[in-house]
Amino acid sequence: MDLQQFLQLFNPLPGNHYLQVCTCEDKITTALSSLLEGVEGKLNIAIYNEDNLNFSQPFRAMPRDHDMVIIKDVFSKHENPNMILKLAYLTLANTANIIIMEKKGVMDIEATKALLEEFEFRAPNEIDIVEGYDLIMGKKMHMWGNGL
């Protein structure tokens, strides 16, 4: 998996915190962690599998503590994807981004973009840059919708 184009989506600033919500640590986890270490930032990870969170539980994160949330292979499996979006919104700083990644063909792209809009994430776009994955990116805008 070549992640060069994927990593161009990120421009971490000193001290940034990203949150990856996933089923396991992988090359993306390693790449994001290295990227953030270069600016003295931090990658937090919430893992959904048989040893950690199950697909009905919420992940835990502090309000407005993250500059990016990457949800990989969890969104379509979770019993309550609306809760996942609400938690992502709450933990993101203003003007921060959310990325939802699912294996190609698993996610209903248009429905997911509409759901992002419903939860006050603006300008949701489908981006085809990771082989084998559908990726949608949206932005939490300051003072829009929920105002958090």
Image (spheres, rainbow, N blue to C red):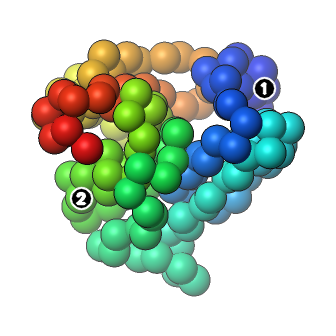
| Picture residue at 70% right of the left edge, 52% below the top | 42
Kindly state the secondary structure of the residue where label 1 is placed: loop
Question: Is residue 135 visible in the rendered structure shown here?
Answer: yes
Q: Where is residue 3 in the image (x, y as percent from the top left)?
A: 75, 27
Q: Tag 1: residue type?
A: Asp
**Quick one: quadrant of the N terminus?**
top right
Q: Name the residue under label 1.
A: 2
Q: Where is residue 116 in the image (x, y as percent from the top left)?
A: 25, 33
Question: Is residue 100 visible in the rendered structure shown here?
Answer: no
For the residues labelled 2 and 1, say whether their Cβ atoms are less than 8 Å apart.
no
Q: Which of marks 2 and 1 is nearer the N terminus?
A: 1
| Picture residue at 30% right of the left edge, 26% below the top | 141
Q: Name the residue under label 2.
A: 83
Q: Tag 2: residue type?
A: Met
Kindly state the secondary structure of the residue where label 2 is placed: helix
Q: Quadrant of residue 23?
A: bottom right
How many angstroms separate mark 2 from mark 1 (CA)?
31 Å
Circle 2 packing at 10 Å, graded few (<14), some (14-19), many (20+), is: some
Figure check: 77 above or below 18: below
| Picture residue at 52% right of the left edge, 39% below the top | 68
| Picture residue at 60% right of the left edge, 61% below the top | 45
Nearer the camera: disc 2 or disc 1: 2
Figure check: 72 above or below 48: above
Q: Position of residue 125 (x, y in %)?
A: 37, 17
Please state if 55 lies on the left or on the right of 108 as rendered: right
Figure check: 72 above or below 11: below
Please state if 23 lies on the left or on the right of 135 as rendered: right
